[in-house]
Amino acid sequence: MTGRFKLAPESAGGILLPIVAALLAYVFWGTPVVYPLKIFVVFLHELCHGLAAVATGGQIERIELSAAEGGLCVTRGGSRFLSLNAGYLGSLALGASFVVVGARSRYDRAVVALIGFVTLAVTLLYVRSAFGFVYGLTAGATLLLVAARLPPTASDLALRVIGAVSCLYAVWDIASDVLLRDARGSDAAALAELTGLPSAAWGLGWTLLSLGVSGWAFWLASDARMDGKR
């Protein structure tokens, strides 16, 4: 119908799947089912710190992941301001991209394979904690197997689920690290020392941006006008 936009049934699935995935992730947040996804989001967070440093003339020295869902990226040089912001904002951008690509691209398997390859490469080059090294190799190999051995729908689902959890994990992590308890040691605390702006302000800004970008990504995933899989 000219001049009006109607959401197609398949488009509704595009937006419902990441939302349902996120809701189920929160329901089963403390269980082994969601645990590997949470660690993967921590991996993306730390990798984005490092990529920002590299992009601004620095280098990554090492990345660490812990079984307690902690992470550390040690860098040398580059912009400390951009690197500190890149943890949450970079993983948020990646998550939003995964949601949209999973819903609207025909190249799900290629993207999942690329993510798996990058995970393996980063692990071999930079991850220096025992837990993180084993996890990175396992996660990378699993993603490559999903892309190579399982039907395309498996790669589609993997992108949307990883994307949804990555988008919304930022909200949970920011709230727990900055807004609900002592922020010492967090990215927001480091930015507060660097800029003089309170850590709570950084946390609130990141939270609002996370909600906005997540909503935008879910909307793009549902937009029939962008349905590249039809």
Image (spheres, grey):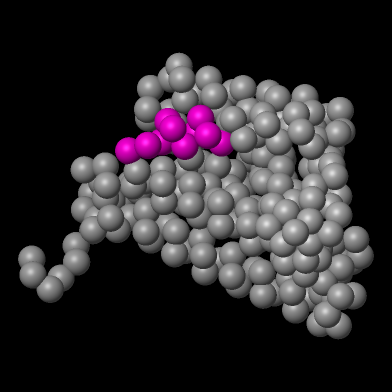
Q: Would you say 72 lies left or right of 152 here?
A: right
Q: Which residues are magenta?
A: 106-115
Quadrant in the rendering for residue 121: top right
Residue 104 position within the rendered picture, expressed as x and y whole percent measured from the top left: 34, 47
Residue 118 position within the rendered picture, expressed as x and y whole percent measured from the top left: 62, 35
Name of the residue lying farthest toward the top: 149
Front residue of 17/96: it is 96
Check the image and report above or below for 86 versus 59: below
- Which residue is found at the position 90% from the left and 75% from the top? 193
- Which residue is found at the position 59% from the left and 30% from the top? 117
In the image, residue 107 lies in the stretch drawn in magenta: yes
- Which residue is found at the position 34% from the left and 43% from the top? 105
Give the main secondary structure, helix, strand or loop, of the magenta stretch: helix
Name of the residue lying farthest toward the bottom: 196
Name of the residue lying farthest toward the left: 1
Front residue of 26/101: it is 101
